[in-house]
Amino acid sequence: MCAIAFQGVQTQRGLATVQGGEVAALASYSRARVQLDLQTAQILAKYNVEIADAKSGHSSRPITPLN
């Protein structure tokens, strides 16, 4: 009975480790996408930002939340 409980704990620990790796990979991917958009000058277009709006600090369009 004790061996089964120990295996259950080991399995849960392994799952938590894998899930932590997944979160780290998703965060790394997100940072890489932002860097790619910055390096290829796509960041403003991606978020529909006009240069005039960026300079003035005001948006000519209503601001909508990101999905």
Image (tube, grey):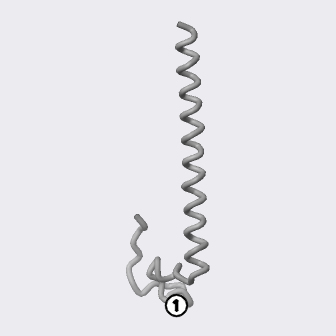
> Residue 50 in the image: x percent, y percent?
48, 88
Residue 22 drawn above or below residue 36: above
Please identify the quarter of the rendering in which residue 16 is found: top right
Residue at image x 57%, y 70%? 34
Q: Position of residue 24 (x, y in %)?
A: 60, 51
Along the line of sight, the residue nearer the viewer: 15 or 61: 15
Q: Residue at x 41, y 76 (%)?
A: 63
Residue at the bottom extreme, as displayed? 52
Horizontal and vertical percent position of residue 60 = 42, 87
Relative image position of residue 9 (x, y in whole percent): 57, 22
Does 23 appear above or below 53?
above
Q: Secondary structure at mark 1?
A: helix
Q: How many marks?
A: 1
Q: Nearer the viewer, residue 36 or 57?
A: 36
Please say if 56 is above or below 7: below
Q: Quadrant of the C terminus?
A: bottom left
User: What is the crowding at mark 1: few (fewer than 14 residues within 10 Å), some, or many (at least 20)?
Assistant: few
Amino acid type indicated by mark 1 = Ile
Query: Is 7 placed above or below 58 here?
Result: above
Asked whether 11 or 60 is in front, the reply is 11
Q: Quadrant of residue 20?
A: top right
Quarter of the image holding residue 21? Answer: top right
Q: Residue beneath label 1, please?
A: 51
Q: Residue drawn 60% across and 64% down?
A: 31
What residue lies at 54% left-to-right and 90% top-to-bottom? 56
Name of the residue lying farthest toward the top: 1
